[in-house]
Amino acid sequence: MKTKQILVLTGFILVVLSSCVKYLDPYPNGQRTDADLWKYPEMVQGLIGQMYSGLPKNYDNNEGAYFDCTTDNAVSTSTTRDMAKFAQNLIPTSADPFLTYWDRDYKQIQLANTFLKDRKGFNTRFIIVPHLDSLVRFRLQGEAFALRAWFEWDLLQKFGGKGLDGKLLGVPIVTEPVDISKSVDLARNTYDECAKQILDDCDSAFKYIPIAYRDYLVKNLASDAAYAGSEYWARIDGITTRAIKAVVYLTWASPRFNPTNDMSRWDSAAVNAKRVMDFKTTVDGTGNTANSQRAAAFTPVAQINWVNPQFSGGIWITQYGSNDAMEKMFYPGGFLSNGTMGASQDLVDAFPMKNGYPISDPRSLYNPALPYANRDPRFYSTIFYNGATANFGTTTGRVMYTFENWENGGKDAANRIATNSKTNYHIKKFVYMGWDNTASTKDVQRHAKFIFEWSHMCLAFAEAANHVVGPTNTAKYGISAKAAIQYLRTRKTTDGLAGFTTTDPYLDEVSADATAFDNFIKIERRITNCFEGQRFYDMRRWTTTLTELNKPVHGAGVIKNTDGTYSYDLTKVVENRAYKSAYLPIPYSEMLRMSKLVQNEGWEAWK
């Protein structure tokens, strides 16, 4: 067996030198091997540190913004990108873009299993002082369970589905330190078994792990802050395990994965989402920001900041170094960027008007001749459209760029150059507005991956609670589904634009009927979570057919008239979809290696 070792760095997260499936990488001096693991506490602690290195850290990838190009939210500018080919059912077995996530997740699970096996990690002595050693041991044990739960969930969300045998299947559950790249032959567990495994791991973690890493929650701050305080802000904590449970139950309760319509799953989704919401409002919202809390006190209408890894509305946030990846990804060629994807007309149409009514409602302020006027303020903070400006710093700051999307001469028009969006829309969400690509010195900022954020829990609670007790019932959970959505509708946008007021007649109207509210929630999820890589999973779990996934995706046709006005064709089909399956394929290389694996339906050629 090839000997592997690890490089352990002190601090929050470890640098992993190899991307292979094995978990131990060489020390530079070659003096420690995997056989030495349990002799060195820093190597044992390094098992957990390496797990953090496997977490997604941005949105410019195939499980982030690009994954929305598989849905009616967005279109890839290049037809050769992986997600464009996936949406056209053109992925070859030799170039599976999802294999990397299968390998990554099982690699991290192997690290957790190594730590947890026979409680060796928990029984390791890390610090001489018994009390401090206990803090470290309990924290690491809890993190091992919690991180394993998250990677198990990532596998289930990506690869769970109905197999060719007609059964709802998950992925192989592995709780021993097995390297699945070796000669093993694993079978897929049922979807239900996988969901229960994740939930059990969350509960196991909760017994050990701090509820959150906040200085004001540390009893002996002077001595214990370095081991349990806000220094560990971005590590997984107890409240995050409740968030994991909420999203697991939410998917498990949905029509595609809940054939018996087990209502207890909806209830559990609501209960766990509400637990997270209560923590944010009653604990993180106390106003106690002393002792380097890392973030200001949370408020339910806190304005989200995508370039702030310490945003107070974050539940679990990862971060990566300062760069301009998102800006170059979304801005067009005219702004010296790549325009790699564009928002769809379908998504634009989902945004209501500033009075809260959808554009299809006769009471709305919508004017087809001026389709971007009087829209929901969230629209202006999410989409760059014809005539929009990119303003430095704020919505009223210096104009850096003006979008010209008309097809008879506009510099940003679809197909004019290869780095313009095909839909005649570009994307503003995630973009740091202090970045000017025409400046000699560019100001770049850290961007954050919000694995779980306040809005995610509000949306999960509202959807689940509505299924159990309807939109306005407050007796069962303490607040109503309607109230959870009102938090999001009234908060400021990322640009600081004012949201809807508490006088929201359309919200009142749809809250009178559970079915109408359910449809409304789906639109709110779409608007709030766009380009975060969640739309595909939502569209899939809400239905049992391929109809929605296979609807054509539209863009805007724009013509500049001689008088300076514009004519719009908002029914222009930009891309058709050709899904044969609602599920991702089990990696073909794994199907070849493991005879017990069953492929997902629609991927018969990959078996």
Image (cartoon, helix red, strand yellow):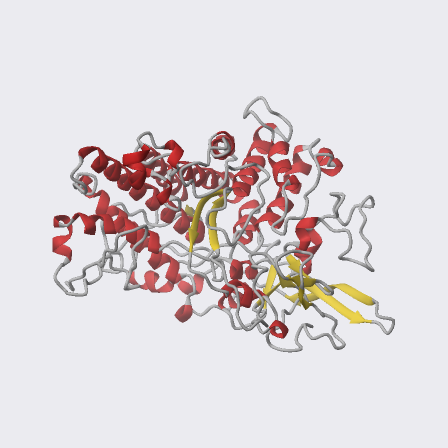
Task: Pick the quarter of the image with the N terminus.
Answer: bottom left
Q: Nearer the viewer, residue 176 or 183?
A: 176
Q: Is residue 81 above or below residue 151?
A: below
Q: Which of 523 and 191 lies nearest the eye of the viewer? A: 523
Horizontal placement of 448 versus 42: left or right?
right
Residue 416 drawn at (x, y percent): 67, 77
Position of residue 114 in the picture relative to residue 492 (left or right): left
Specify the quadrant of the image occupied by residue 33.
bottom left
Front position in the image: 71 or 36? 36
**Residue 181 on image: x %, y %:** 26, 60
Using the image, determine if residue 530 lies above or below residue 192: below
Residue 161 showing in the rendered view: no
Q: Position of residue 155 (x, y in %)?
A: 39, 51
Indicate the quadrant containing the C terminus: top left, top right, bottom left or bottom right: bottom left
Which residue corresponds to the image point at 57% horizontal and 36% vertical from the top-left?
A: 300
Q: Residue at x 59, y 46 (%)?
A: 525
Residue 516 sits above or below residue 404 on the image: above
Residue 323, compared with residue 508, is above or below; it is below
Q: How many numbered marks have been drawn onto this rendered protein structure?
A: 0
